[in-house]
Image (spheres, helix red, strand yellow):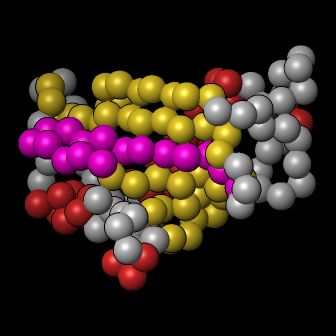
Amino acid sequence: MTQIEAGGPDTGTQPRRHVHLAQVRYADLDPQHHVNNVRMLTYLEDARISFLRYDGVVEEGQEVFGAMVVARQEADYVAPLLPRSTPVRVELWVTEVRNASFTLAYEIRDDTRVFLRASTVLVGFDVDTQRARRLNERERAFLAAYA
């Protein structure tokens, strides 16, 4: 939906966060009338895609990141997310950068409550060889701004 920036060097010890605003839709609800756990993972995916294509670059062939695959994802459902008229924030930041992979941490939250905490390990991927690849300097520089 929308992305903004939060945190950064002026906020003390917290890393800079990428913030994606997600609108809860009726189709996201389960029979218990809260956002389905699978839809919560979709919110993370939307935030991750907006982060990887952020930096003002949206034209094909000008992306900061090459191909990536999700190697691992963990989620802790902290509180039920109920229908609401205002969007929730999906905040993400970088917790680790390795040779061929990096880890993103997330919170789905509003001003008073955290609904979900999660992490995803992404691996650089070479489509031609179908194998992991090392992260390049441009990718590492972008990630460093959120670590």
Most prominent secondary structure in the magenta stretch? Answer: strand
48 left or right, relative to 140: right
Residue 95 x, y percent position in the rendering: 30, 48
Is residue 1 something one can see in this rendering?
no
- Numbered disc total: 0
Q: Toward which corner of the image does residue 58 lie, by quadrant? A: bottom left
Whether residue 18 appears in this view of the structure is yes
Where residue 133 sits, quadrant-wise, is top left
Picture coordinates of residue 132, whole percent (x, y): 15, 30
Q: Position of residue 93 (x, y in %)?
A: 40, 54
Q: Quadrant of the C terminus?
A: bottom left
The image shows residue 44 at horizontal and vertical percentages of 55, 41
Q: Is residue 84 above or below residue 10?
A: above
Judge from the rendering whether residue 30 lies leftward or rightward of residue 96; answer left or right: right
| 99 part of magenta stretch | yes
Asked if the stretch drawn in magenta spans residue 78, the answer is no
Q: Please give the name of the residue rendered at 83% of the width and 30% of the height, measured from the top-left corner.
A: 34
Residue at x 90%, y 27% (from the top left corner) = 33
Residue 44 versus residue 52 in the image, above or below: above
Q: Residue at x 32, y 34 (%)?
A: 121
Question: Which residues, given as a range, are shown in magenta?
Answer: 95-110
Assign the N terminus to one quadrant of the image.
bottom right
Which residue: 46% across, 71% down?
7
Q: Judge by depth and name the residue closer to the eye, 1 or 147.
A: 147
Q: Is residue 37 left or right of residue 5?
A: right
Residue 18 or 116: which is nearer the viewer?
A: 116
Q: Residue furthest bottom?
A: 10
Q: Is residue 81 above or below residue 17?
A: above
